[in-house]
Image: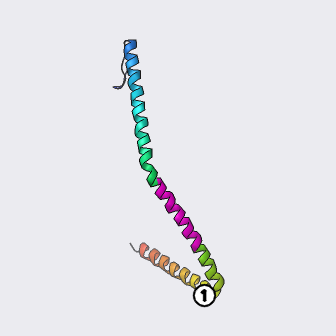
Amino acid sequence: MQTPDQTDYKSPEQIAEATRQAVRDVDGADAYTSGVEHEARPARRRARTMMDDLRRTGQRLREQGGHYVADQPVRSMVMAAAGGAALTTLMLAALRGHGRH
């Protein structure tokens, strides 16, 4: 049983023409993928630039945070404890609210 795409070739000329058509189809697909790759280059470049900027920002923030903790150890500890307490309160409130519904 043949699928609709299959053809029962009767002559060498039909086979040769089908082969030539397949080669043309592949060449067209290659040209299309080359075009897509070319169009994607600026987006890849922007993404790479954005990732580099994020890395630099993260590094800068880590350094600033380290300096803050070194300069103000008690204040940074109190701020961390307050942040943890606030987060815990929000989580507990969310869990209580979720159980009522």
How far across and down, in percent of the image, does residue 41 sit? 46, 50
29 to 2, vertically: above or below: below
Q: Quadrant of the C terminus?
A: bottom left
Displayed quadrant of residue 55: bottom right
The single residue placed furthest to the top in the displayed view is: 11
Is 8 or 25 nearer to us in this picture?
25
Find residue 98 and report its image quarter.
Answer: bottom left
Left or right: residue 48 versus residue 36 is right
Give neighbour class at mark 1: few <14, some 14-19, many 20+ (Cα, 10 Å): few
Q: Secondary structure at mark 1?
A: helix
**Residue 76 visible in the picture:** yes
Residue 9 in sight from this viewpoint: no
Residue under the point 43% across and 40% down: 33
In this rendered view, identify the residue nearer to me: 95 or 41: 41
Quadrant showing the N terminus: top left
Q: Name above or below for residue 53 compared with residue 76.
A: above
The residue that label 1 is drawn on is 75
Please give the name of the residue rendered at 37% of the width and 19% of the height, measured from the top-left corner.
17
Image label count: 1
Q: Amino acid at mark 1?
A: Arg
Q: Residue at x 49, y 62 (%)?
A: 50
Q: Is residue 74 above or below residue 9?
A: below
Give the residue drawn at x 46%, y 78%.
93
Q: Position of residue 3 (x, y in %)?
A: 36, 25
Residue 15 place in picture, x, y as percent: 40, 17
Give the main secondary structure, helix, strand or loop, of the magenta stretch: helix
Query: Whole-percent x and y of residue 49?
Result: 50, 60
Name the image colouring: rainbow
The boundaries of the magenta stretch are 44-60
Question: Is residue 40 highlighted in magenta?
Answer: no
